[in-house]
Amino acid sequence: MTTISSDFNVKVHGRFLRSVFFAGTLGLLAACQTQTMNPDVVALDATQGSQQNIASLTSVIAANPNDPEGYNVRGAAYGRAGDTRKAMEDFNQALQLNPNYYQAYANRALIERSLGRQMDALNDYNRALQINPDYDVAYIGRGNLYREAGQTNDAFNDYTRAIELNTTDPRAYHNRGLIYQRRGQQEQAISDFTKAISLAPKSAQPYNGRGVSYLALSDDKNARSDFDKALALDQSNAETWANLGLIFEREGDYQKAASYYQKSKALNPNYQPAVQGVQRVLGGGA
């Protein structure tokens, strides 16, 4: 099960915003907490990692070399562009200029996580929360680390804390919903997925997640509706195709089930629910 894409947090104060405005990039620096709902489901503005935007930010930094916000914002742009080395350099510089810059710790943690440096990422999230115990972004990021490590109780607690802080980040609800789902608490999962959908209505993952919980409750009608919506938003998710295949299989429409399982298998040849579904409905064929 995928989660909502995690992304960089950019908090920009007035002084830096004015500089960026005069550099012609104000529109590109809108708040951009999104999934990685990433793997961790909110569309990213591709221009934020563009060379043009990075060049504009570099000009701003040249005019304000001691302002940590410039490095944090450019670091996020480098991160979106996939340049992890330069992103790390900028976040490190931001923290050298302001060791209490908790947003930069959380952003650096995202890069460390992408590089497989999970302990470094955990330490940075912890540091961000030491500085600001009410920083919902860090709770969600740390929760994602815990969930990936199989520490679901710790992850659940972090997502819940972010929700208690009135986060508007759909990942907190979506990812907590996944944990409720694994625990068999389907009604609670549906509630969380529904909230995630309200916050990110164009994201496919919460619809797929809620559909799975409806399936577990044998509510095939609502499950199909959610899977159809998920596919309308994203046809590249093998899981959703297989989930619809299961519904058709349960209804006895094996031909249609086979077509959905085969589509899922084409997207991900190693996705076992699709592989096994094809074997069931076609008797081992295909």
Image (tube, rainbow, N blue to C red):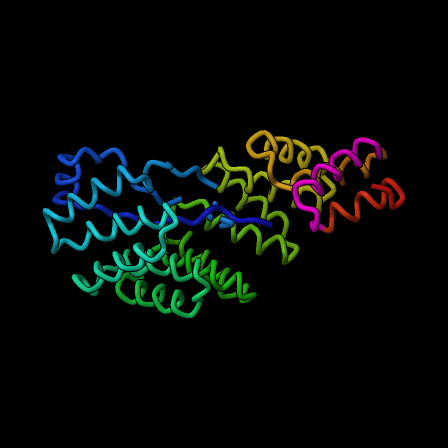
Q: Name the quarter where the C terminus is drawn.
A: top right
In the rendered view, does 175 fall on the left or right side of 183? left
Foreground residue, 164 or 198? 198
Residue 47 drawn above or below residue 134:
above
* Residue at the extreme left of the image, as rendered: 63
Residue 212 percent coordinates (x, y): 66, 44
Residue 133 drawn above or below residue 9:
below
In the rendered view, does 117 fall on the left or right side of 9? right
Q: At x 46% / y 60%, what residue is drawn?
A: 143
Q: At x 36% / y 55%, what residue is drawn?
A: 84
The stretch in magenta equals 253-271
Q: At x 62% / y 52%, what residue is drawn?
A: 181
| Label tally | 0
In the rendered view, does 196 fall on the left or right side of 28? right
Foreground residue, 175 or 99? 99
Residue 265 percent coordinates (x, y): 71, 43
Foreground residue, 131 or 242? 242
Residue 39 percent coordinates (x, y): 51, 49
* Residue at the extreme top of the image, as rendered: 232
Q: At x 26% / y 37%, what residue is drawn?
A: 52
In the rendered view, does 249 fall on the left or right side of 243? right
Is 255 covered by the magenta stretch? yes
Is 105 covered by the magenta stretch? no
| Prevalent SS, magenta region | helix
Residue 65 percent coordinates (x, y): 12, 53
